[in-house]
Image: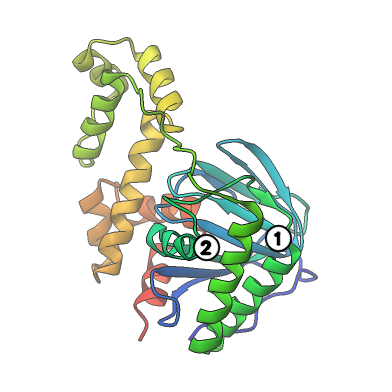
Amino acid sequence: MPSTTHPGMDDPGTESARYWRFSGLPGTELLTARFVTTTFTRHTHPTYTIGVITGGIEEYSHSRGKARVGPGGLAVVGPGEVHTGHAGVPEGWGYRVFYPSPEVMVDIARELGMRGTPGFTESGIHAPEAARVLASAHVAAEHGDRLTSSALVRRGLGMLLRSHGRERAADPVPHAARPEVARAREVLSSRLLDPPTLDELAAQLGIGPFSLSRAFRAAYGLPPHAYLNQVRVDRARQLLLAGRRAAEVAAEVGFADQAHLTRHFKRHLGVPPGAYQRALLAP
């Protein structure tokens, strides 16, 4: 069980972050963190990201613009939605985050009479009661209270969907991506260990490098090199959760060494791969 003590917002410069899974909330990872100097590069998650800000201010960009969220607010992004993250004030920000799978959210939405994969009308959301319930669910999970946490998280997510939900999430990837761009994505995903240069990739596809880079970012929210690193990090997470050692994982997904993996992993998730693995595989 993770520690329930975390640095307060009056402790300048101190950062902490811990991911974990809790059996009372299947299909959901959790994070309790306080960040000051940490910044998140443009990245995505396969899950929803629903964070209750507990102190300070977080600023981030997302597919629909920019958000600035303070205490009691909710920072919400959907699966596959490209976003960033950094402190909006010198003392940083603290938050409690849920990462529910799309299947979890669809199940809750279905109980509310919503069809399809749910989305949200906003990203930085002011919903004080839903935020209070979700924060209580997170604390209950931290204390190992299966019944309370599972009941409160479903209640809080249901409240959030009722107040700010919509029946269909905006697809962060336009359906009409150019065939060359879709092919570039396939090539990068299949060549994690020996990716082509941008010029080589463009020549293979019969398109100019500048045009390819611009079209790729328009379609997928990330330039080709950033997309490649996103795929590498996603694959690294899967291997770490399968119990593989970080050094082996780094080599298998195409990073130069473990330090290279750690640098990118922290820019996507806020914690080093070893800490992520220990927390999520802990009995």
Nearest the eye: 55 or 150: 150
Callout 2: helix, strand or loop?
loop
Identified at 25% across, 62% down, the residue is: 239
Horizontal relation, residue 110 to residue 195: left or right? right
Say which label, 1 or 2, has the lower sequence index: 1
Percent across and percent down for residue 35 are 64, 61
Callout 1: helix, strand or loop?
strand
Percent across and percent down for residue 273 are 39, 63
Residue 26: mark in rendering: none
Percent across and percent down for residue 44 are 45, 46
Q: Residues within 10 Å of mark 2 (few under 14, many from 20)?
A: few
Please, is residue 31 above or below residue 183 in the view?
Answer: below
Please, is residue 38 above or below residue 208 in the view?
Answer: below
Residue kind at label 1, given as amino acid type: Trp
- Report the colour scheme: rainbow
Q: Residues within 10 Å of mark 1 (few under 14, many from 20)?
A: many
Percent across and percent down for residue 88 are 74, 49
Residue kind at label 2, given as amino acid type: Leu
Identified at 64% across, 52% down, the residue is: 164
Identified at 40% across, 19% down, the residue is: 215
Please, is residue 239 above or below residue 143 in the view?
Answer: above
Q: Are marks 1 and 2 in contact (CB under 8 Å)?
A: no
**Image quadrant where residue 38 sits:** bottom right
* Disc 1 versus disc 2: nearer the observer: 2
Nearest the eye: 4 or 79: 79
Instruction: Specify the farthest residue to the right.
Output: 10
Answer whether residue 3 is visible to the viewer in this image.
no
Quadrant the C terminus occupies: bottom left
Q: Which residue is mark 2?
A: 112
Residue 93: mark in rendering: 1
Identified at 45% across, 74% down, the residue is: 20
Answer whether residue 133 is visible to the viewer in this image.
yes
